[in-house]
Image (cartoon, rainbow, N blue to C red):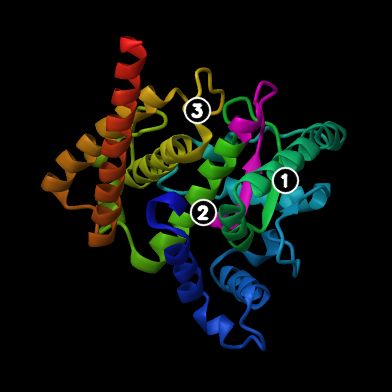
Amino acid sequence: MFQLIGLQKNIETVVTLSYKQLLKEKTQDTIGLKRAYRNFLKNIQVADSIPERDSPKVTFASELSVINNLIELYKVESALNDKNQTTVIINQNPEESLEYISNNLKKCESEFIKFQTNYPEKSNLFELVINYIFCAPSNVAGGGSTSNGIGVIWASPKPNWQSEDFIEFYTHEFTHNLVFLDERRYQHYVDYDLILDQDNFCKSAILCTPRPLDKVFHSLLVATEVLLLREESLGHPNNPKAHPPSETILKNCFDTIYSIERLQTKSQLLTRRGLELMNLCKEKLNIINNSLSKKELILISS
């Protein structure tokens, strides 16, 4: 979403959603907006699970009690929970948890500093939107975000991740949060009951399996952002760890768009805003496809 629609439009979404709270702030600068945004989130989420902290910066949670509260956000049952996401975080005893946090949190923090250095504009928006990052283990995922805890990112970094993988991870989870906010502002789906119908499942761009449209739509936006990150600055890696190679992601994205377009003509599930974002993804992906095709031709001819 950062590369897809730009910095200003994402800030406008945060301001629009937090407008009532922002009017109460004495200073309507970055700190005032951050405080107003946190107050907005308090009104729409389970406040008891998200600790109070009046800071304009991202907090890397190190206290076990805080982390346990944040984990509860990922255990909220939902009819749209098609992959049993409530069980992906492994339950550990306190001693094991502290050891895991100690081994991984510093790495996440140091890689975030690199992210800030290399992407200052993006990281400024990141620090406005994201309030907490915490570490907890998983056998099946490298981390995640949840609409029950907008502004929170869970990290489960893998031992073989390089700096580029961390940058892609932060981009991935940041995108989920921006999409949550964009959906709050505009609404992306016409009818959630129709999304639950398995006849309306589409192919995910990340897991490549039939899933509810909201998960598939997120996967398309996330995958497009990762490809744009690679195309515009990071480069297309030969052996990425956090995500598949670019050619694979690109093919999966086009398959996903085809899957959604075929469904849209039948069931009309996406709103005008949803269709706008999907078509923008399609436009950007075609540009990346042409770019990769030229690079491949250059490689073959040389």
Q: Residues within 10 Å of mark 3 (few under 14, many from 20)?
A: some
Q: Position of residue 222 (x, y in %)?
A: 43, 42
Say above or below: 242 vs 188.
Answer: above
Q: Nearer the viewer, residue 159 or 28?
A: 28
Disc 2 marks which amino acid?
Answer: Asn
Q: Position of residue 173 (x, y in %)?
A: 54, 45
Q: Residue at x 74, y 67 (%)?
A: 55
Asked if residue 11 lies left or right of residue 216, the reply is right
Q: Which residues are magenta?
A: 145-166
For disc 3, the marked residue is: 243
Which of labels 3 and 2 is toward the front?
3
In the drawing, what numbered circle is on residue 179?
none
Asked if residue 67 lies left or right of residue 153, the reply is right
Q: CB of mark 1 within 8 Å of CB of mark 2? A: no
For disc 2, the marked residue is: 177
Q: Position of residue 23 (x, y in %)?
A: 56, 87
Q: Residue at x 62, y 25 (%)?
A: 139
The extreme right residue here reads 95
For disc 1, the marked residue is: 113
